[in-house]
Each structure stands twice: as structure tokens, then as C-alpha cells.
Amino acid sequence: MTRRGFLKVGGGVTAASLTLAAIPADTLMRASGAARAVGQRMPNGVELPATPPRRKRPDSVGFAIVGLGDYALRQMMPRFAQTERAHVAAIVSGNPDKLSRVGDAYGVPPDARYSYETFANIASDDRVEAVYIVLPSGLHADWTARAFAAGKHVLCEKPMALSSAECEHMIAAGRRADRKLMIGYRSHFEPHNLEAMALMAGSAVGPLRLLRTEQSYRMGPTSPSENWRVNRALAGGGPLEDLGIYGLQAALYLAREMPESLSATTFRPAGDPRFAEAFAHVASQWRFPSGAVAQLATSYDSSGTNFVHARGTTGALIMDPATDYSGQRMWLEGGERREISPGDPEVQFARQLDHLADAIRDGIRIRTPGEMGLRDLRLIEAIYASAAAGGTVRLNPDGTMRH
Ligand code: NDP
């Protein structure tokens, strides 16, 4: 009997822990297509500033923005108007028209507008100290390595990369270059999520017993060649890396422990071009050493939701929406139902940018370092491994699968 056969005894899940060797070979690999940086059209609904944001402090850190897509142009770049110590110093894009329009609007000098081909010249551009990678996820590892090779600090969007091996290379490259690496986990700078962490650390609901997270939306008609979010080379499995990672993060920062085992399931409907390469849903169930249990679900094919529920022995913390750009709401239940409004969620973007600037200038510890991104990719790999083999995966405290 083969190892896989052994694991499948009984027609499905066995009590035996899975090993990497037991996972079908293609599960952890990219499926098709090459990941390459290519310019795209201007996203819909972008409002460029009428006047460029001013840098506020003489020690402000200059950022190069790599990839002028939806998140960069509609969310992050406008937030530089609210930063204290960070400013846009350069832009990098494969679309010359965007370079020109965005460069003019943000006051980026023409010689600080780079294409993917000329990016390496940024090494000798002293106006740039940090590079912000806002490219499709399958390009994060490569472009982080290029930024470190150019001697710059890096803020890399989530997910850090598509595999733990890529994350390890990114961390090693940062160490070799003696430069900082931060992952764009903005919830660590958002008042509701910060307050939720403090409440859970302070036993506001008693010892945690059950945790549920859901992040979903329904994707319109598309295909892997039209939309990188369903293209395996650029997005991995899809919703888990994109949306579910917020629930995964929340489960970890609210439970404040690593799961010791998990089991998972994925679903991909046949014949739907949206899901030729990506999963429609990914769900997993985790057990923590304390005895708490978490259920995480994420989907690209169900109506929109984004909630986190943490239920302890004396009450529950409800966050809904939990990790959006704005509009977060949060309640404590048990005894009186009490809404908690600790501040404006929209500060998360600028605070995140200032945090890296503070780390560069003052040497403060980065709250969301590469090691955190690596830990999360290990759990994502364990989720796919469990789903592929149909059984429970046991985990080491660092998130690697137990052999
Ligand atoms: P978009 O598709 O809107 O933009 C991506 C941009 O990357 C493109 O506009 C293009 O910029 C550049 N690009 C380079 N090569 C490619 C390629 N092969 N295919 C597509 N685009 C390419 O994506 P988003 O802005 O929504 O997401 C970018 C990153 O930000 C992702 O990693 C995502 O996970 C993350 N993100 C994080 C969020 C958060 O809340 N933290 C929210 C949304 C996204 P150009 O034309 O200038 O070359």
C-alpha cells in the first residue's frame, strides 16, 4: 500500500497525520501561466489629487510605489496626504500613460517614474528609501528581491507570497541587504482590530472556546487570462490568499496561539471559467492547544461578508464588518450587549506607512514582519495540503506540517 493509500484507508479521513510526501504533487505548485509584470489599464473610479500631497517632516521617508493598480491608486496613494513621515518619491508601472498622469498628480519628477524594465536604476536614486510592492501576489517575491538588491527597504502587500519557500527567500534577501521587510497587514493598525486584540488579551469574553471568521464576495464573470485574482500563477488558490487571509490573521491575533492541527476542504465548480484555476471556496477547522476551535471560511462565489466572532466562556466579541477599509463595527456580548467604537478605521492606511518609516528612522520593531507573512503562508499550505489529502494535518508551533 502506498503512503497515500494508507492515508485514505476507510474511504476518507484517517486519524494519521499527513506528511508532505503524501500530498498530490501538483497541490503545492503553481498550475499554469508565467508570473510576469505587465502594465494594465487605469482602474475605474480613480480620483487623482488636484494638488500633490506635501511631505510634512524633513526626515520623511521616500517610497517608490510599484504597480499602479486599484489598491495603490484608490486606497494607498491618497493616504500619503495623512502620513507624518512618509511620502511618494517614485512610481513604477508598465503603463506609460499612468506614469505620466499619476506622476503629475502626485508631483513625482519625470526622472523618478520607472518602468519594470528600468526599475533596477532605482538603486542609485537616493530620493527612494522604501519600495512598496502592490503587484499581483505571484510577483511579490520576485519584486521584493529586486528591491532589496537595489538596497531599499520593502513594504510588501499581503499575501507575502504564494509559498513559504518564497517567503523564506524574501526574508533571507532582506537580511543579506540589511534592510527592513514589512507586510501590508493593515488591520494591525486599525483601531477596532487593535482594541479586539487588547480585549481578548484581557479575557473580555473569558477563555476562548469558539472562533468563526468569514470573508466572501461574489466575483462576476471572468477567467484566469482576464483577471489575475483567479490565475493560479498570480494568485495561488484564490480567495484564501486574497480575502481569507484576514480571517486567518484575526484567528491568530485573537486566539493568541498557533493551531496544533487543522482540517480543510476546498471546492471548485466544474465548467466555470472563473474557477478554472482558483478555488471558489476554502474552509478550514483548527484546533488550538488551549482546546479552542476555529472555523474559517472564504469564498469568491457567495454574497459579500466579512465577520469575526470570538466566543469565550462568559461572552462573545462580534466584529462585523471586521477588516474592511472603513465602517468596522464591534460588539461585546454576555450580560449587556455593548458596542465598542475605538476610533476611525481609515487611519489604518497612513499609520501603516508611518510605521515602516518609524522602523527605518528609529529602529522600532516592525509589527507585521516577514516572519508573520511566512507563518501565514505555512498555514495556507497546510490548509491546501489537508484539503488535497482529505485528512487532518498536525502542525508544529511555527506552522510547519509535522512529519
Ligand atoms: P490590481 O489588479 O488592481 O492592480 C495590480 C497592478 O499591478 C496593475 O494595475 C499593474 O500596474 C501591476 N501589474 C504588473 N504585472 C501585472 C500582471 N501580470 N497582471 C496584473 N497586474 C499587473 O490589483 P490590486 O491593486 O487590487 O492588488 C495588488 C496587490 O495588493 C495584491 O497583492 C493584493 O493582494 C493587495 N491588496 C491588498 C489590500 C489590502 O487591503 N491590504 C486590498 C487590495 C489589494 P501597472 O499597470 O502600473 O503596471
Image: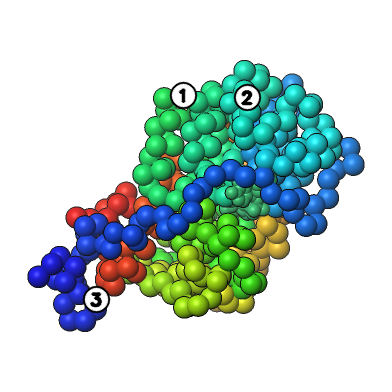
Determine whether the residue tagged by mark 1 lies in a helix, strand or loop. Answer: helix
Sooner in the amino-acid sequence: mark 1 or mark 2: 2
Q: Position of residue 260 (x, y in %)?
A: 29, 60
Tell me how the rendering is colored: rainbow
Q: Position of residue 57 (x, y in %)?
A: 75, 25
Report the residue at 62% width, 18% height from top.
124
- From the image, state whether disc 2 or disc 3 is nearer to you: 2
Q: Quadrant of residue 266?
A: bottom left
Would the CB of label 2 be found within 8 Å of ligand 1?
no
Q: Give the residue furthest to the right.
A: 50
Determine whether the residue tagged by mark 3 lies in a helix, strand or loop. Answer: loop
Q: Give the residue furthest to the bottom.
A: 11
Residue in front for this viewpoint, 42 or 163 = 42
Q: Which mark is residue 113?
A: none
Q: Quadrant of residue 168?
A: top left
In 3D space, how far apart are the residues under numbered discs 1 and 3 (Cα atoms)?
45 Å
Disc 1 + disc 2, Cβ < 8 Å: no
In 3D space, how far apart are the residues under numbered discs 1 and 2 (Cα atoms)?
15 Å
Mark 2: few, some, or many residues within 10 Å (few <14, many ≥20)? many
Q: Would residue 277 be found to the left or right of residue 50 on screen?
A: left
Q: Which residue is mark 1?
A: 177
Disc 2 + disc 3, Cβ < 8 Å: no
Residue 341, relative to residue 338: is it above or below? Answer: above
Residue in front for this viewpoint, 159 or 225 = 225
Residue in front for this viewpoint, 176 or 317 = 176
Specify the amino acid type for callout 2: Ile
Q: Which residue is mark 3?
A: 13
From this viewpoint, is residue 191 visible? no
Determine whether the residue tagged by mark 2 lies in a helix, strand or loop. Answer: helix
In 3D space, how far apart are the residues under numbered discs 2 and 3 (Cα atoms)?
52 Å
Q: Would residue 188 be found to the left or right of residue 277 on screen?
A: right
